[in-house]
Amino acid sequence: TAGCTIGTLPAAAWWFQEFAPLSLPANLVALPLSSVILVPCSAAATFGPPGAAATAGWIGTWGSELLLFLLRPLAIEPWHPAVGPAGALSLTVALLFRPRLPIWGIALAVATWPAPRPAVDTATFLAVGQGDATLLEGADGTRILVDGGPPGEGVVRWLRRRGIRRLDAVIVTHGHLDHTGGILPVLAQLDVRRVEIRDVHGTEAVRAAAAARGIGVTWADEPGILHPPPAFEAEDVNERSIVLRWGPVLLTGDAGFVAEDLLRDAPGSPVLKVGHHGSRTATGEAWIARVRPRLAIFSVGSDNPFGHPHPSVTARLSAAGVAIRRTDVAGTIEVAAAADGLHVRMFRAGSGWSPTEWFPGDPQADDDGAQESDQRELLGSGEQPGDPVPAGISP
C-alpha cells in the first residue's frame, strides 16, 4: 500500500492538483482494521446464520466507529501543490533514484516552478462545456481570468497544471452560473488579488467567497471595459454583461443585440469571442461589420440543449469571411498576438496541442489602425487595486 501510494504520487498530484499529506498514515491505520474486523464481519453477515449475522453486524459497527475515531484527527484539507507535467516527471525520476536524496530537492523545485510568462499577449479560451472562461496573459506577466465556467474544478485544475498560482484579477462578466460556478474553486485555491464586477445580481456566492479569503471586490472601471455604463439597467441580465477589449480580443460575455446597438463606437478587433455562446440574440450583421474580426471564438458545450451556436450566427460570420473556431469541436483555444499576426493552436485531452495556425496581419489594430495593447490600460501598473464597489451596489 505504501509503495502504491508513493509510486502513484507524481501522476495523482499532476492530474488532481491536490495531495492528501496524511493519506499514507491513514491507510496504515485503516487497512489492518478493515482486513481483521470489517471484511470478516461483512462475510459473516452475508453468508452466516441469523445469529452469527447479528453478532457480526454488532462487531462491524463497533469496528467502524473505532476506525472513524482513529482517522478523524487525520482528516485535514488536501494540499494544492500546482504540479505541472515537468514537476510530475521530475518527481517520478526522483522516486526511481530515491537513495540519491539530493535529487529530491531538485525534483521539488521543478514541481513547484511557476509557469513562464508568454512572450506575447495571449488569450486562452478554455473548453469548459456550456459556459465561459478565458485566461488573458500579458507579455508583462499580467494574468486575468474572465469568468470561470460552470461549477466544478476544471478551470482551477487547468490553471494549476500550467503552474499558475497567482491571478492579478478575476473579472465576472455577469452572474449566470455557467460563467461564475468555476470561480469559487479558483478563489479558494489560488492567490487572487481582486475580483472585478459591474452587475452584482447573481454574484452573491462569488462575493462571499472573496470576502472569506480577504479578496477585495472592486467596481470594474478601467478603460478596456466598454460596457455596461454606470447605472445601466436592462431587463435581460445578459445585456448587462461586461464587454471587454483586451489586446487583439473583444470579449462580450452574454451580451446581445441591445448591448451591441449601444456600442456604436466599439473598436475593431481581430478576435471576437462571440456573445452568448452563439445565441441568435447576438452577433448581428451591423456588429460584425463594426468589429471586423478575422477570427470568431464560440465557447459552447457539445450537443448542448440550447442549440448553440445558432446556424444564423455562423452563417453571418462565414458570409463576412470570418474564421470560426469552437471549443466543443477544437477544445481549448489559445490565441497569441505576435508581431506578424495571430498564432492559434488548440488543445484536446488525449491528442494534445494541434499544429499552430497563422492569421497574418496587425494583431492590435483597431478602427483607426492604432496599435495599443489595452491590457496595460485595463490594469494600469498592476500594483494598485481598483476602486471599491460603489455603495449602491455593494454586497
Image: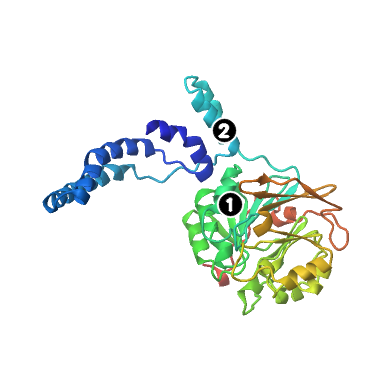
* Type of amino acid at the residue the image marks with label 2: Leu
**Secondary structure under the numbered disc 1 in the rendered image:** loop
In this view, the residue farthest toward the right is 369
Q: What is the distance, in whole Å, between disc 1 and disc 2 at their CAs?
A: 31 Å
Q: How many marks?
A: 2
Q: What residue did someone put label 1 on?
A: 193
Picture residue at 49% right of the left edge, 43% below the top: 80
Q: Position of residue 374 (x, y in %)?
A: 76, 56
Residue 89's tag is 2
**Could you tell me which quadrant the N terminus lies in?**
top left
Residue 107's tag is none
Does label 1 or label 2 sit earlier along the sequence?
2
> Does residue 366 appear in this view?
yes
- Classify residue 265 as left or right of residue 304: right
In this view, the residue farthest toward the bottom is 235
- Classify residue 344 as left or right of residue 95: right
Colouring: rainbow
